[in-house]
Amino acid sequence: MESINSKNIILGISGGIAAYKTPELVRRLKDRGANVRVVMTPNANEFVTALSLQAVSGMPVRTEILDTEGESGMDHIDLARWADLILIAPASASIVSRLATGSASDLLCTLCLATEAPVFLAPAMNRVMWGKPATKRNVSQLLDDGFLVLGPGVGHQACGETGSGRMLDPLDMIKLLEEQISKPPAVNKILEVMITAGPTWEALDPVRGITNASSGKMGYEIARAFQQHGCSVTLISGPCNLDTPSGVRRIDVTSAADMFNAVHTNVSKIQIFIGVAAVADYRPVNTESQKMKKNASEMTITLVRNPDILASVASLAEPPFCVGFAAETENLRNYAVSKLNKKKLDLVAANIVGQENLGFNAEDNALLLIGKDTDQQLGPASKATLSRQLCTIVLKKYEEKNST
Ligand code: PMT
């Protein structure tokens, strides 16, 4: 894993209660050998003092674009060029919104516009603010623009509520940061990755059907992560109300049979297959051509098994590297191992479902990753964070498998 040792890091601090953790964060970054310069937004000054940050970083703290006290020759362009990476922690809802519009309203936003270095955001806000459509739109825009997001964590919040939106603790944040600056293993060609996502819809008649609560978020974030790692990504999507991640080729399907066909039409050129979709295991034997009438007091619907798309890909003569998901309400590990072996997979990402705030249609998830030499817990964390972690691990395992 790549270290931040000797890296030039601008720590951007925006206005939020989690700013009280930043002197500790500066210390931990410096412990790892990083050179740290702190830039604060005007609101950050209300939560932590520039003097404390100057003391721990050993460098003057910048707050204004035109800083007559700043050292000479280090204007905002020089500072933007100096950085190997910018880490904004805490990233408030306000700075997330400003960055999403490309605002240059303060020094920190201006640096993010002026730099060619990667910019990482560690969001910190109340769980309702984090869950609002406007915040989701802004974060999604920033991910498309190449920003990287660390967290947020789940737990008790300063406002007294519990949920997603806590800034990660400094050591967890630095660990994730180092994972994400680690280059994916060198591969001598652009990898073709196929991901299934979302639910399927098995029609009973023209207006009714059997489906499930999958939103597609997990699969879409995984697609985004692989695309941002330079892979060519095809997303086979069941009915979802999500924007296609930038640069991803999306094929829309409705039923499990449609998904099976779309996968097998495109599977010959891929190197990695990830089945994230919640595919209906059964479909009605008959689909009525007209809306069914409620004549009888009881109704029996006969269902027939759908083909297992993942198992069918994994049992091809020359299968791609296959990653399955396992959605379980109990015995997570046992069922995951059983799916790994039964479907002949390279990796299984197992998640507990049926809990509030995790899994189906939630912003966050937790994955138990099981493979031949893999046994690793990821999260709880946002689906975007988990996807980037999963992407790094899958590319590494793919490379190991194909170099032997
Ligand atoms: O979409 P979100 O709201 O973000 O929620 C994400 C999720 C909870 C749906 C996701 O993390 C998840 O667990 N996806 C797999 C859901 C599932 O159907 O699990 P399963 O244990 O029933 O299936 C095991 C594997 O076989 C899965 O990879 C599935 O895609 C695949 N499968 C199952 C049946 C079938 N007929 N064909 C398949 O390919």
Image (tube, grey):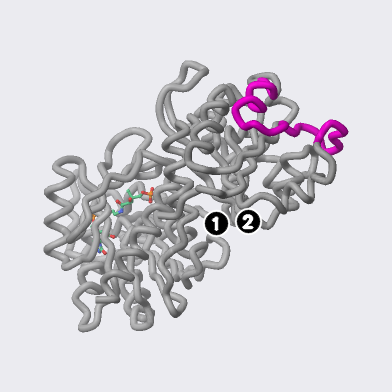
Q: Which dot marks residue 243? A: 1
Q: Is residue 340 visible?
A: yes
- Quarter of the image holding residue 262? bottom left
Provide residue 345's location: percent of width, then percent of height: 20, 66
Ligand 1: quadrant of the figure: bottom left
Image position of 28 with respect to 403: above or below: above
Provide residue 134's location: percent of width, then percent of height: 62, 40
Mark 2, Cα crowd under 10 Å, few <14 / some 14-19 / many 20+, is: few
Q: Which dot marks residue 145? A: 2
* Left-right relation of 395 to 117: left
In primary-sequence order, the first of circles 2 and 1 is: 2
Q: CA distance from mark 2 to mark 1?
A: 14 Å
Q: Which dot marks residue 83? A: none
- Quarter of the image holding residue 163? top left
Residue that appears at 46% across and 76% down: 190
Image position of 178 with respect to 135: above or below: below
Q: Is residue 292 visible?
A: no
Q: Is residue 57 magenta?
A: yes
Specify the segment rendered in magenta. 49-70
User: What secondary structure is found at the residue carrying circle 2?
Assistant: loop
